[in-house]
Amino acid sequence: MPKRYKSYSELILNGLFKENPIFRLALSMCPAVGISTTLMNGFLLGIAVLFVQVASSFTVSVLKNFIHPKIRIPTYTLVIATWVTVIDLTLSAFFPTAYKAMGIFIRLIVTFSIILMRLEVFAAREPVLPSVVDGFGMGLGFMFGMMTLGFIRELLGAGQLFGHQVLPVKPLLFFILPVAGFFCVGFMMAVFNYVEYLFKKAREKRIKG
């Protein structure tokens, strides 16, 4: 276990909240804005990224002693591309409807900065199990972010959730547009920052008290 983390659960919570890829680190914003128009889209892309992140973290952690430092980034990219190919072929073969909904974004997972970043700063330096847990936490954080955005945008933009009508009122079509993605991301970033501020205040109060 890395010294900066006390437990595996802390690693997972770190990916979900403290270093959430979308709402805290502002990484992989293209899919966050472009494809998070529905809750299902957010879930499906989130699952794909979760798989690629965990599999890539496992692979790099296992092979880190055999990767030359001068070619580590191309090697990480090759590892990511390999697992993206696996999930791409799996979805196209067994889940064609989901694959069609994701479109080119499945293949673009190779370029998602959050995956490459975690391989560089964590998996390439830590043992296998912590690396897998870290990858799971970061992938879960990405999926949480995508589903949160999909929930807000589908509910307010179409009055639906998972394609089922839940609101009787006329939807605000603005939330389906790409610009609404930036608006929703900014709003959630503000929420995360405010919650962190409240936690810090509460911790300071306990220390003084």
Image: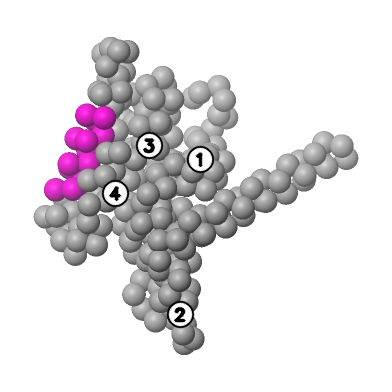
Bin the neighbour count of mark 2 within 10 Å (Cα to Cα): few under 14, some 14-19, many 20 and up.
Answer: some
Taking the spot 47% from the left edge, 47% from the top edge, the residue there is 22
Q: What type is the residue that disc 3 sits on? A: Ser
Judge depth for marks 3 and 4 and give the one in front.
3
Q: What type is the residue that disc 2 sits on? A: Pro
Closer to the chain start, of discs 1 and 2, is 1
Front position in the image: 53 or 6: 53
Asked whether residue 197 is in view, the answer is yes
Magenta-tinted stretch: 77-89
Q: Name the residue under label 2.
A: 171
Image quadrant in which you'd find residue 157: bottom left
Q: Mark 1 points at which residue?
A: 25
- The colouring scheme, among rainbow, by chain, secondary structure or one colour, is one colour
- Relative image position of residue 4 (x, y in whole percent): 57, 25
Bin the neighbour count of mark 1 within 10 Å (Cα to Cα): few under 14, some 14-19, many 20 and up.
Answer: few
Q: What type is the residue that disc 1 sits on? A: Leu
Pointer 1 with pointer 3, Cβ within 8 A: no
Task: Using the numbered discs, state the Cα–Cα distance from disc 1 to disc 4 in whole angstroms.
Answer: 20 Å
Determine whether 7 is above or below 142 in the image.
above
Pointer 3 with pointer 2, Cβ within 8 A: no
Taking the spot 45% from the left edge, 61% from the top edge, the residue there is 179
Q: What type is the residue that disc 4 sits on? A: Ala
- Relative image position of residue 3 (x, y in whole percent): 55, 22
Judge depth for marks 4 and 2 and give the one in front.
2
Single out the residue that lies furthest toward the right. 209
Closer to the chain start, of discs 3 and 2, is 3
Circle 1: element type: loop
Circle 3: element type: helix
Q: Name the residue under label 3.
A: 113
